[in-house]
Amino acid sequence: PSEASVARAELRDRVSTTASLRPFFQPGSVAVVGASRDPAAIGGRILNALIANGFRGPIYPVNPRATTIASLTAYPSVQALPQAVDLAVVAVPRDAVLQVIDDCAARGVRAVIVISAGFAESGADGRELQNRLLEKIRGYGMRMVGPNCLGLMNTDPAVRLNASFAPDFPPFGRVAFCSQSGALGLAIISLARERELGLSSFVSVGNKADVSGNDMLQFWEEDKNTGVILLYLESFGNPRRFARIASRVSRQKPIVTVKAGRTGAGRRAAGSHTAALAASDIAVDALFHQTGVIRAETLDEMFDMAAALSTQPLPAGRRIGILTNAGGLGILCADSCEAAGLCVQELGASTKDQLKQFLPATASLANPVDMIASASVEDFRKATEILLAAPEVDSLIVLTIHVGLADTAAIGRAVCAGVSAARRHGGQGKPVLTCIMDRAHAGKPIRADGEQLPNYAFPENAARVLGKLGRYAEWRNQPPGVVPDFDDIQPQAARALCRTALQESGAGWLSVEQTRSVLSAFALPLPRAGVCRTAEEAAALAQDVGFPVALKLASRQIVHKSEFGGVRLNLQDGSAVANAFGEIRDRLVKENKSEAFDGVLVQPMISGGVELMVGVTEDPIFGPLIGFGLGGIHVEILKDVCFRVTPITDRDAAEMVRGIRGHPLLEGYRGHPPADIPAIEDLLLRVARLVEEVPEISELDLNPIIALPPGQGCLIVDARIHVTPLH
């Protein structure tokens, strides 16, 4: 499909998804099925939350054993309601849920939230029941949040919907939050109130049987009240769809995600918790990097990020200014900023001259600027304005601890005043973060003079936030990459060869000849070579390709040829080739592995260049995961490898090459010539295309690849391909 047709399909999907979710967040009326007079029961808590938080439309309790609940007329079933409702919240025993869905469909309900648990998260029986539930939902053309969820909220003053059993209703704001965990959602809503973080909406998706995090991303992409999106994920339902949507949304609205299940224990817990199949953490990191998603390590860091993203502009660069009244705080902050990839550079002469006019001689005018403990409220105001307006500063962190006479609340107001003044001359478009270290301000924003500044408990928190803001800003400012087309590849030939190998031998490693044929079908660079089965053939081929040559055991059974003793290098003539051939055969006989002999590969020695590796493995969730690093023995010792999830773009390939610690070797180091970097990037793009086009490839290892000087390309010296039948 062409890019235009893909774009049209994505637009249709976005429009239809957004329209189908609107009844959840902007319902004209709501029914609570399973409403209860018992305020401790789930149905009672949901009904009371709708009433207490002032939902603007009619509310209908549904309970066959009551005529009134909470002063509202109750109805025996959904079909008995006096009018069709937009949204039904279902809190009944799981075995009654399917009948409720039938009743809702008959009454024209378009959206349902199934709070009830006992579905896929509880085992095979529950999974079967959830499948039947989803079949009904889709058959009726409805949408469903849940099952096994907390519910959802919309804080818009025109709606004020709390269709959940959460006791707290957060203030209205620009941050949307989606949680896969209901219980965690309760804690997060409470924390949002405590930290005075306004939410536009909240949804607990539970088992994600129908409405998923991907759907919510598309809804919030179009939501004018949402500027920042937070996700708590335990699993990816459709990671490829997530990648497409997140890549698009991240260019307009930041997405901050906590992905649980980093460890084996965490993944097992996620599996039992919400029937999640957790992906490898390397693949998750790669996917987030490619799509611009900001990964938060903890929930606390997620809130730290949200506080900054919802109130501050993105930085234009990595140069940071630090202002403090305590030297120790400034040192901690400077160290943390450097660790976060920020630049704490010397201030310019003009900026220092302005600070000298009012700061004491004992103050430090380096960066950090330490005004010392005697700094007054007015000193904070002036210094904030000067530093934020300074052309050599992209972002500002203001730190204060109560060591003098100045009141910290007054300092907060003074900093806001300084920021407001600086915004009018040189300080616009620069984020400001504060760390006012006292109990009253911990984690709560500073507000004054029309400014709202995020405030952090410790300098390290502020530094980490600014580091991630800077990386996200750089990602967003770069143009999107493109997945190139190649007119010199033969995907059908490569796939036919792999299928034939599977039919003949089953899952396993391809032979040397098959491997070279598959690579050649994608125009991947290989040296002249051939497989020989006698010493005479080997000597003749060596003469043809040119001495010196290398001999390598060709075997589908023996994967690690060097460890086995199946490699001979720098053979200078036919006699040496014949002797090496005999040694390899004798080694196989000695180890009782003569049946593993497929021949020997004869290829010329490649002199010079840098040894690299490219590998591909199949992630059970994300599909092919491609890695790039230094080759030979370095890859296992240094573990200097950069990963991406396929498909990859030209930008991904360029970042992979520059993303390893060994990159200086490719640019030319201590007299060594640089490598042909465009050829390396081209090779990466072709390998990624190969594993996309030939899904039977479950593992691929090109190691080493010799990267030659500019204009000379690179050559794959050794290669392995493992194939597996498609399920």
Image (spheres, grey):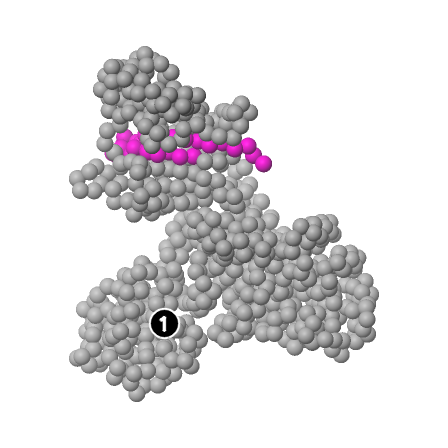
Q: Nearer the viewer, residue 113 or 649?
A: 113
Q: Where residue 596 sits in the image (x, y, percent)?
A: 42, 23
Give residue 348's quadrant in the image. Answer: bottom left
Would residue 710 appear left or right of 99 to someone viewing this image? left
Give percent across and percent down for residue 436: 36, 77
Q: Is residue 182 above or below residue 626?
A: below
Q: Tell me if 397 is positioned left or right of 726 in this view.
A: left
Residue at the (56%, 53%) spot, across then down: 271
Residue annotated with mark 1: 458
Q: Which residues are magenta?
A: 700-727
Q: Residue 238 location in percent, x, y?
A: 56, 48
539 within the magenta span: no
Residue 137 appearing in the image: no
- At mark 1, the secondary structure is loop
* Residue pictured at 55% horizontal, 56% vertical: 270
Judge whether residue 721 is colored magenta. Answer: yes
Q: Residue at x 31, y 60 (%)?
A: 339
